Image (spheres, rainbow, N blue to C red):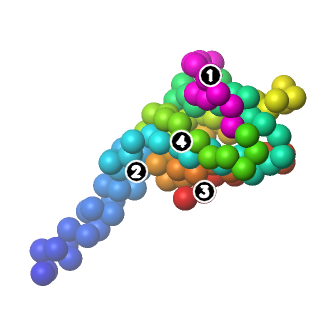
Amino acid sequence: MRAALLLLPLLAGCAGAGGDAVSTLGCSGELTLRNQGPMMVEQAFVSPRGPAEWGPDLLAPGTLPPGATQVVRGAPGRNAVRIVFANGRAAEMLALDVCANPNLGISPTGLLASR
């Protein structure tokens, strides 16, 4: 028991030092998109490299209608997310940790990440 108590501060320090590595352990990178607004979402991009390299549209060939939910996959850890609405307007979140917050609410006022 005493040995276990001595290890607790060491383990806590390791978790703090490698927070990103620890938080991605067992994480698939899945992100649930929830269209909570009245407008169709035409495109969704999730990139660990950010806006410089969005990659393919993760909704193609489909869309995300109002009230619908779609699971997409990014890389475990921090990703940039870009949502493009039917009217061409876009919303971005540049540092979303998909392991800590695997749900993304989409509304006319922006994007809201949650657990």
In terms of image quadrants, where is residue 59? Answer: top right
Label 2 vs label 3: CA separation?
Answer: 15 Å
Q: Which residue is mark 2?
A: 23
Q: Could you tell me residue 35's position as x and y percent? A: 71, 46
Q: Which image quadrant: the N terminus?
A: bottom left
Residue type at mark 3? Answer: Ser
Q: Which residues are magenta?
A: 52-64
What separation in Å lies between label 1 and label 3 (alpha carbons)?
26 Å
Few, some or many residues within 10 Å of mark 4 (<14, 14–19, 20+): some
Secondary structure of the residue carrying tag 4 is strand
Mark 4 or 3, nearer chain start: 4
Q: Secondary structure at mark 3?
A: strand
Front label number (2 vs 3)? 3
Q: Which mark is residue 114?
A: 3
Q: Can you say whether 42 is above or below 22 in the image?
A: above
Q: Is residue 53 magenta?
A: yes
Q: Secondary structure at mark 2?
A: helix
Which amino acid does the dot numbered 2 rest on?
Ser
- Crowding at mark 3 (Cα within 10 Å: few <14, some 14-19, many 20+): some
Quarter location, residue 10: bottom left
Q: Is residue 110 left or right of residue 15?
A: right
- Residue 64 on image: x %, y %: 69, 37
Most extreme residue toward the right is 87
